[in-house]
Image (cartoon, rainbow, N blue to C red):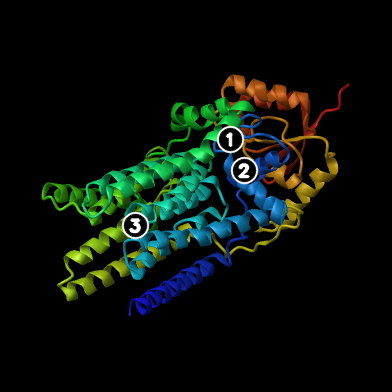
Amino acid sequence: MLTSKIKSARLVDLLFVALLLSFAIAIAYPRWRAWVDWRDEGLLAYGTVRVMNGEIPHRDFVSLQPPLSYYASAVVFKVFGTSLLSLRIFGLSIFLLLPLLIYAVGRNFIGPILSFAAAAPACVLGLPYFRFVPFAVWQGIAASFAAALFFIPATSTKRQWLAFPAGLLTAISLFLRHDQAVYTIIALFVLVIALHFIDSVSRNNLRRALLLWLSGIAIVSVPLLVAWWRIGALPEMFRQLIVFPFATYRKTSSLPFPRLFAQGSFLDTAEAFLFYLPPLVQAIASLYIVQSIIRRRFRFREAVLTFFIVWSTLFYLQVLVRSDLTHLLMTLTPFFLLTVFSWSIVLEIIAHRSRIDIVLSVALAIVISSFLWILRPVMLPDMSKEIEQLNLPRGGVRVAPAAVIANLFQSLKAFVPPNRSILALPYQPMAYFLAERRNPTRWNYLWPGDQTARDYENLIEQAERDPPIVVLLSQQREVAMFAPTIIEYIEAHYDRTDNVGDIAIYVRREPN
């Protein structure tokens, strides 16, 4: 009897996993190779090329992301070839994996239907908005969820050994996206503390799981930190990943929180409401936890809810600095689980009232489906424009106008010898990747306020040690405002020869 129930449960899970993958593939199929992100995708793609050429992140070039994301992408390039297509294959893999991880984490606590409900929104409110580029944040989220998937059963079952691979994955997530990994570590610690007060959970098992988890983290992180310290990358890593966000990023890149009732259209209002929904749900769930403690009804269910509240809230902190849709979507994966688990508690409370249960469940499904449908134009890239295959060795994606872009980079490759450099300013690192020519400086981007006057002088000094034959300059007026020395350098040594769109092309002036 028990065996048949287990088989039946597995069949149900397989059915929901198949439905989840089908939904994800339906979203991804027409979109995963569409368009190019010239900025951030270029940073990842060209940073990976620099790593493959032997350069060390942070020491040899400036990066706002931890180093492991470049090495993970380098492995993908080694296997599938160096191209945007390979990068999108990596992104597509993460996109298909993440809903499965959300579903699997949810199945530790709730049934297949609610686990599916937690995982399905990730197929829309996530990587499709990022054009399926495997940014460090998505690599880190996948590793963090995989760590939680292993760690959770280690705390509440006899399989404490699962905490060790959870520790390995936690350490990996630290070097993929450090802030979100720290949030996950804190949330898992909170889970252990909360479970410590549950009589049905063995404290010895908790201590054993915690020790194995910490051991797994140490085995990966300590050798990597020692290695990066010995090659001179650790001090720069600390400055770029820890000091910079607090000292500079919050000043130069912060965006105000959207006002809910000051939006121009219904779509804008729905988008703004998405910013307010997580703290609303977190606050309600927190009130429930407080009253559970006061009434001495804090049990396993409440311990798990506490974990989801902390995990979701910590992730959401990222939105408080830069309140745009891009950064909001990075924070929502734990929120999906918090919402659905909270709903499961509501269903338990009204379990004896079947009609209310059905009505509320149907109403919730309609609200969620309608909300995702309303946000569809914002989250999913526009496929209505004519896009064509980018005919370059490192292409493999579809863009518009493909012929103009291909002609630009083919001309660059023909004009600039392979042993010479180019400079793409202020923020077009994709040019280095597609033109297959190097950047002679440590900076792959310029952003108002991120660099100092001394940084601009260093950039010019580095460029003159390996003089670029061509400079691609966009947003010249803006660059002249925040980095006038860069414009002066270009005008002193280069002649403007052509324009492609908003990009001015400068060629190195022959010495007299």
Q: Position of residue 495 (x, y in %)?
A: 78, 31
Gap between marks 2 and 3, in whole Å?
36 Å
Mark 1 is on which residue type? Ser
Q: Residue at x 58, y 67 (%)?
A: 30
Residue 440: % across, % down: 73, 31
Q: Who's the residue at 44% across and 75% down the image?
A: 15
Question: In which quadrant is the N terminus drawn?
Answer: bottom left
From the viewer's side, name the closer residue of 358 and 453: 358
Badge number at residue 70: 2
Q: Are marks 2 and 1 in contact (CB under 8 Å)?
A: yes
Cα separation between marks 2 and 1: 10 Å
Place of residue 107 in the rendered image (x, y in percent of width and height, measured from the top left): 36, 63
Residue type at numbered disc 3: Thr
First in sequence: mark 3 vs mark 1: 1
Using the image, determine if residue 100 lies above or below residue 162: below
Q: Nearer the viewer, residue 246 or 304?
A: 304
- Of 378 and 141, nearer the camera is 141
Q: Residue at x 83, y 36 (%)?
A: 419
Tell me the residue that label 1 is attached to: 63
Q: Earlier in the sequence, mark 2 or mark 3?
A: 2
Q: Residues within 10 Å of mark 3 (few under 14, many from 20)?
A: some
**In the rendered image, which quarter contains the C terminus?**
top right
Circle nearer the viewer, 2 or 1: 2
